Amino acid sequence: MIAENAYHILDALIEQDKSFAIYRLPGESSPRFVLQTSGVPACFDDIEHLNGHKGFVIAPFRARENSPIMLIQPDCTDLAEVVLDTTGNEPGESTNRKNKSEGKEDYSQQFLRFHEPLVNGEFEKLVLSRNKTIDREESFSPGRSFFYAAEKYIYSYVYLFHTPLSGTWIGSTPEILLSGIGNNWKTIALAGTRFPNSEVVSWDEKNLSEQELVSSYLLQQLSAFHISPERNGPYTVKAGELAHLRTDFSFKLPKTTALGSILKALHPTPAVSGLPKDKAYQFILENEGYDRLYYSGFLGMLDPGKETNIYVNLRCMHIQKSSLTLFAGGGLLASSSLDEEWEETEQKLRTMLGILK
């Protein structure tokens, strides 16, 4: 493990507006680090443009001018070797953005707006998300919070990244979008949520249906690349205090230069958007009432020649100068209940609230 004061280096890199990411893969004991010491990350407006590229990718829910797809191209991969800038350069323009922070009354109105077309049969599923903005304490340290989250959420992908354009984000996510090495690859369907108070988790029809919708979607999208994956699941997995249904899909991928095309076919999955895919995506953009930015996008190391680990950006927090904005969402079906969905988002928000240091 890196020296105890490693979080000071991360905090200093943020203050100096450097482009970096530090992440800890599920089950691993040590984090991995990437830093681009010169220039700015490459930016793209289409996921498919990632074909043939490698680096640490950060993609939003919707690519826009102020939140593009970015690729950190690391020339330093050891946090212990970081040389901090001592010239006193000021960081770049602040990326503070005001997000509407929802209470239950606001959420109730949104729930009804999303639920009605589900009941009418216009959609099979819609994901409704919300955010919560709280004051940032003077003592808060992004770096310290990252290391605490890595210790607390052992079986999730835990990350902290900063770029001048995106600002600073931290998160803990259990959902693989695309992972592989050589020609062995996998993706997962993660849908259905419970917050159990015991080791025994039971699943109702709503959660089972939600899981099957995501699984069927992934099979359909992969079939466009003539991929017939092996399926394992669904089974119960824990992520912090929550439990989810998960199905694994493993497959061979002889040509890995077109990872951008596969990522574009998979994103956004019904776990963060809905079905039918394009129609649900547009409905969310027009009706959710705020910009998700990098929440429910994806991120991770993209390297066709070595190892790729791309995760959906769930359970995350946007760190700003004077505030912290947390994000959470839930999948709605026609059978969904307002009170149950509100409570699910409350539980998911606690994942980030629980790491503030």
Image (cartoon, helix red, strand yellow):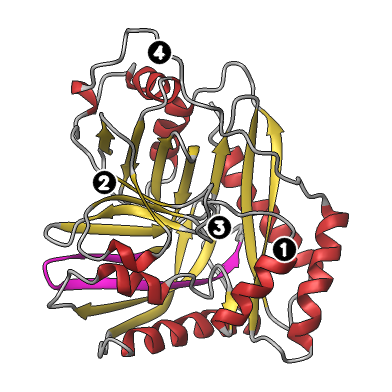
Give the label on residue 288, or none: 1
Badge nearest the viewer, 4 or 1:
4
Whichever of callouts 4 and 1 sits on the residue coming sooner in the sequence is 4
Q: Determine whether 133 is above or below 269 in the image.
A: above
Q: In which quadrant of the rendered view does residue 331 lie?
A: bottom right
Res 247 seen here: no
Residue at 64% in and 86% down = 124
SS at mark 1 in the image: loop
* Residue where numbered disc 4 is placed: 89
Task: Report which residue position mark 2 lands on.
Answer: 28
Q: Mark 3 points at which residue?
A: 242
3D distance between C-alphas at marks 2 and 3 = 20 Å
Amino acid under label 3? Leu
The first of marks 2 and 4 along the sequence is: 2
Q: Which amino acid does label 2 sit on?
A: Glu
Residue 277 is left or right of residue 45, and the answer is: right
Tag 3 near tag 4, CB within 8 Å: no
Q: Where is residue 60 in the image (x, y as percent from the top left)?
A: 49, 56
